[in-house]
Amino acid sequence: MYDDLDGGGWDLVGAPAGMTIEDFITANGANIQVLGDNYAFAQFNNASGQWERYATDNTDTGSFTPGQGYAMATNAGDGATVAFTGDIKTTTQNIDIINNNDANEGVGRRWNLVSNPFPSYINGNTAAGAANFMDVNSAVIDDSFLGLYGWNGSDYDTYNNTSGAFSIAPGQGFWVAAVALQILRLILQLLCVPPQELEILF
């Protein structure tokens, strides 16, 4: 879904703590790849099917949206880190997802980039725990693409209830395909401490 030849390797992330965009750039801008006048840090607009990058002149304001996903690339190769600081979420988080596939003469997309907004793992599927992301949200995900789609560095992996047990890591971003305008629910009951042998997304 996203391959930027100017930006190197990308990761899909979310904010596991409340933080403004300005504070995040101030703390981490030196570690984020720069592409012209923008950072390699973007959100996906599925109404237009386009990525919207954050500018290096720090004119972008606002805060991370809990549960929303972002694409990001560092300038230090594998193993580089960025830090999120701020208040942690202690209540259920909901985020709107929408199928814009038929909008704007086919320009829109059904895909929504979302994330785990908690500083804890959450159960991904039934095999991981009775309360899990797939069971809570399967009704709002398009049946033709039922699952979570995660970037592994070169391609997308699909995780769903036919997969082995998996957990979603704190701050991990991933794609879901929406049926229509729906609410994706990230409830506290999904939180878990995954056993060592459990597969971690991604």
Image: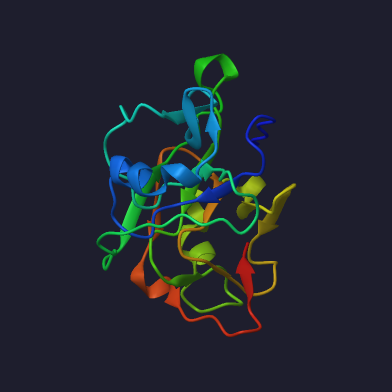
In-front residue for pair 94/17: 17
Residue 86 horizontal side relative to residue 116, left or right: left
In-front residue for pair 161/122: 122
| Quarter of the image with the C terminus in it | bottom right
Q: Residue at x 47, y 23 (%)?
A: 37
Q: Residue at x 74, y 47 (%)?
A: 155
List the single residue furthest toward the right.
Answer: 154
Query: Disc count in the image?
Result: 0
Q: Position of residue 84 (x, y in %)?
A: 37, 57
Q: In the displayed structure, would residue 14 be above or below residue 170?
A: above
Q: In the displayed structure, would residue 169 be above or below residue 101?
A: below
Q: Residue at x 66, y 39 (%)?
A: 8
Residue 60 horizontal side relative to residue 171, left or right: left
> Does residue 45 appear in the picture of this structure?
no
Q: Residue at x 47, y 30 (%)?
A: 53
Residue 189 horizontal side relative to residue 101, left or right: left
Q: Position of residue 20 (x, y in %)?
A: 28, 45
